[in-house]
Image: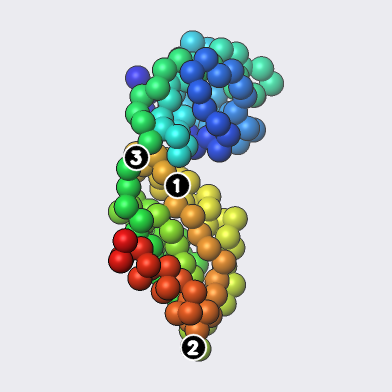
Amino acid sequence: MSNIRLFYSKSLSLNLTDKLDKSQSHYVSKVMRLKEKEVFSLFNSSGEWEAKISNITKSIVEFNVTKKLRHKENTKDLWLAFSPIKSNYFNFMIQKATELGVTKFLPIIFERTIVRKINKERLEKVIIEAAEQSNRITVPSIEEPQKLKSFLNNDMDLIFTDLNT
């Protein structure tokens, strides 16, 4: 069994036949040099599945899902509220928090916060890569940045409601 794990955003099921996107196909065929009939893993919130390469044409990998390896994880919600920081440290923090099991990221803009905008698309890629490497099935979400007052009024109510149930 290969150690290659890829996040697959679409629905997965037994005997599903589909194609990987361009970047994932490049990774599987050119970087990892897998050939037809070799296997790799696909995962999403429904679980982890074994996929066998059925065809590689024009650098697009076609696969067939052969079996379910793991069921979805039963996890507790773990949120990380933080103030955005400079890029390199920010990516590192997001990566390590994902590996430790955070399920939701909540960027909060304080009065003296220097970094006021985040590249959500880039952070989602970092989160997916960290989930692939740390053997997680679920991929954390990242919310839009919000001011502290908004966070205290909205999200804190949700937190205390969850604690009381």
139 lies left or right of 64:
left
Q: Which residue is mark 2?
A: 112
Which callout, 2 or 3, points to the residue nearer the camera? 3
As measured in the structure, the alpha-carbon distance from the residue carrying label 1 to the one carrying label 3 is 11 Å
Lower position in the chain sequence, tag 2 or tag 1: 2
Give the amino acid at mark 2. Arg
Which callout, 2 or 1, points to the residue nearer the camera? 1
Do residues under tags 2 and 1 come within 8 Å of each other at their CB atoms? no
Q: Choose between 15 and 42: the one closer to the eye.
A: 15
Q: Which residue is mark 1?
A: 139
Measured as percent of width and height from the top left, residue 38 is found at 45, 15
Q: Choose between 150 and 121: the one closer to the eye.
A: 150
**Mark 2 neighbour class, 10 Å CA radius: few under 14, some 14 to 19, many 20 or more:** few
Do residues under tags 2 and 3 come within 8 Å of each other at their CB atoms? no
- Residue at figure coordinates x 69%, y 21% from the top left: 58
Rendered position, 121 above or below 131: below
Location of the N terminus by quadrant is top left
Instruction: Say whether residue 29 is visible.
Output: yes
Instruction: Say whether residue 5 is visible.
Output: no
- Residue at figure coordinates x 55%, y 31% from the top left: 11
Q: Which residue is mark 3?
A: 73
Measured as percent of width and height from the top left, residue 159 is found at 38, 68
Colour theme: rainbow
